[in-house]
Image: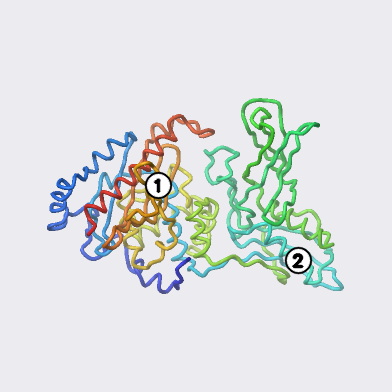
């Protein structure tokens, strides 16, 4: 369940008035380095030795991750940093940065913000004929899906439209068009689609194949739980080769894919990214309109949003719900779209993905005190973003008082000695994970029995091994590296619970 709170309450909590130079009670002032508590760390060190709690450096060495590992843990009641290890070193945060994006969007847009997608008629409707253009206008909704377009087509029929004399246009100018979140990722990565103010199904198309007696049967559709409309804006050709598995090219506004038959087996399916998001949404809506007897011309992109009458609309869920799902499923497109929408409101415009990420970094410095954070996107997909564990842990402690973020974070599964999820584990953790090849992060709140929350951030990266890996396939050793990183995360959390718990 998502906590209900107003933007006023959010701003009057931890984030209000907190700047890079401010701090919570008894927290470090100008310097954000760890400060020893009188009778705190020194005293608990004796307890740790008596109870055989291993030093953090021993746990890190045992994990054998190579590269660099940083962490910071902060008491949310006082804002005091209890312990850190190389906490000021910069790392790629991966999807941990989505937690910052959530706070940014909540602050700028407010938790009750909703996105509006409209069908706009530019002329009057007489006897079922629209004398003008029909425009499908996106409002930056990252959750727009096939079901929503089906409902909008039904609304269009209910409005009395049977035909139009003008054109059918699509407009995604609420956000700038970005062809891919991270150009270094493989073309076929479904988690790396295009961005537009008009986006459908997280800008992914469903590719399904089956080997039959007469050869391959292939479909590309915009499926949902209710519909499976086939699309032509994305097309697939199966070719006789072993590698590369996929190739991509844009031709005349169409996504043209090829796939190697040697990689397909007898059948299967996967989501592929869409690079023509406005045309994708327009084609699907046009098909639903046809099912209601409304014949629309081929969609055409429009550079500006005209005035007119709204004849159909779709309203998204509240932003708080969208962000909860974004953090749960770590959806990259949602992070980019809500982040860019927040920048557009904060600045009055947004020039592009990098421009928006830079503005969010400035906001994080001003509001959360994240002085050494430099992000290049809102999702963490690029390894060029940089963050310190110190910045993140202190920011989480500052945000804790507003109760804005913690209810949205996904529970982190603590495990037993055999690696099985232990639902009865006494330490409860709600956090955001971040994973790239040879990059692993975890940041959030740990609740040891009998005490308040600890805000923490753990960032690990072997950038050397990552740089040598082939991004088109999982590099050797990546799976084991990630498993060891997650084991280290749990061991560090258990160490902190022992040292700083009751």
Verify CB contact (< 8 Å) between mark 1 and mark 2.
Answer: no
Q: Is residue 145 shown to the viewer in this render? A: yes
Quadrant housing the C terminus = bottom left
Q: Is residue 479 left or right of residue 87?
A: right
In the picture shown, does residue 222 fall above or below 110? above
- Circle 1 crowding by C-alpha within 10 Å: few under 14, some 14–19, many from 20: many
* Sequence-first disc among 1 and 2: 1
Q: Nearer the viewer, residue 323 or 129?
A: 323
Q: Position of residue 143 (x, y in %)?
A: 59, 59
Give 447 or 275, whichever is nearer the viewer.
Answer: 447
Give the quadrant of residue 307.
bottom right
| 474 vs 178: above or below | above
Closer to us: 502 or 201: 502
Please, which colouring scheme is shown?
rainbow
Under circle 2, the secondary element is helix
Callout 2 crowding tier (Cα within 10 Å): few <14, some 14–19, many ≥20: some
Q: CA distance from mark 1 to mark 2?
A: 44 Å
**Which residue is depicted at the point 42% across and 74% down?**
8
Labelled disc at residue 154: 2
Q: Position of residue 477 (x, y in %)?
A: 43, 31
Is 36 placed above or below 189 here? below
Q: Is residue 237 left or right of residue 321?
A: right
Residue 468 appears at what percent x and percent y?
44, 29
Residue projecting furthest to the right: 127
Residue 440: image location, x then y, percent = 40, 43
Q: Is residue 343 visible?
A: no
Query: How many numbered circles are shown?
Result: 2
Please tell me which residue is depicted at 40% across the width and 53% down the height of the picture: 423
- Which one is in front, 392 or 278? 392
Which SS class for mark 1? Answer: loop
Q: Badge 1 is on which residue?
A: 93
Q: Residue at x 48, y 45 (%)?
A: 381
């Amino acid at each position: 369940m998502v906590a209900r709170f107003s933007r006023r309450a959010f701003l009057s909590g931890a984030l209000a008035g907190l700047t890079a130079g401010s701090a919570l009670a008894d927290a470090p002032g100008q310097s954000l380095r760890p400060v020893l508590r009188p009778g705190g760390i020194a005293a608990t060190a004796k307890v740790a030795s008596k109870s055989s709690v291993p030093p953090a450096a021993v746990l890190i060495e045992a994990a054998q991750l190579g590269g660099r590992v940083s962490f910071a843990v902060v008491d949310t009641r006082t804002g005091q940093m209890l312990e850190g290890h190389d906490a000021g070193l910069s790392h790629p945060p991966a999807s941990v940065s989505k937690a910052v994006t959530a706070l940014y969007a909540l602050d700028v847009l407010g938790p009750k913000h909703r996105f509006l997608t409209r069908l706009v008629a530019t002329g009057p409707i007489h006897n079922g004929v629209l004398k003008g253009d029909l425009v499908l206008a996106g409002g930056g909704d990252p959750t727009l899906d096939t079901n929503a377009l089906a409902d909008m087509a039904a609304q269009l029929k209910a409005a009395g439209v049977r035909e139009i004399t003008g054109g059918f246009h699509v407009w995604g100018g609420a956000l700038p068009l970005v062809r891919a979140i991270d150009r270094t990722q493989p073309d076929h990565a479904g988690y790396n689609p295009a961005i537009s103010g008009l986006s459908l199904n997280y800008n992914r198309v469903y590719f399904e194949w089956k080997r039959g007696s007469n050869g391959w049967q292939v479909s590309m559709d915009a499926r949902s739980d209710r519909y499976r409309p086939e699309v032509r804006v994305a097309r697939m050709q199966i070719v006789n080769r072993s590698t590369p598995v996929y190739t991509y090219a844009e031709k005349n506004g169409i996504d043209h894919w090829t796939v190697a038959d040697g990689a397909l087996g007898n059948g299967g399916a996967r989501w592929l990214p869409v690079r023509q998001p406005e045309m994708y949404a327009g084609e699907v809506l046009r098909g639903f309109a046809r099912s209601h007897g409304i014949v629309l011309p081929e969609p055409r992109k429009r550079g500006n949003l005209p005035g007119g009458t709204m004849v159909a609309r779709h309203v998204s869920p509240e932003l708080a719900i969208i962000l909860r799902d974004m953090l749960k499923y770590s959806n990259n497109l949602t992070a980019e779209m809500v982040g860019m929408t927040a920048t557009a409101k904060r600045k009055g415009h947004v020039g592009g993905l990098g421009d928006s990420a830079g503005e969010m970094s400035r906001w994080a410095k001003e509001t959360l005190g994240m002085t050494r954070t430099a992000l290049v996107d809102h999702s963490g997909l690029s390894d060029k973003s940089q963050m310190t564990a110190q910045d993140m842990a202190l920011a989480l402690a500052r945000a804790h008082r507003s109760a804005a973020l913690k209810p949205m974070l996904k529970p982190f599964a603590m495990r037993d000695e055999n690696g099985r999820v232990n639902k009865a584990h006494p330490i409860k953790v709600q956090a955001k994970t971040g994973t790239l090849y040879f990059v692993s992060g975890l940041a959030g709140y740990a609740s040891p029995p009998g005490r308040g929350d600890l805000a923490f951030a753990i960032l690990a990266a072997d950038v050397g091994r990552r740089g040598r890996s082939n991004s088109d396939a999982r590099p050797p050793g990546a799976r084991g590296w990630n498993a060891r990183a997650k084991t280290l995360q749990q061991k560090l959390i258990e160490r902190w619970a022992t040292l700083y718990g009751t």
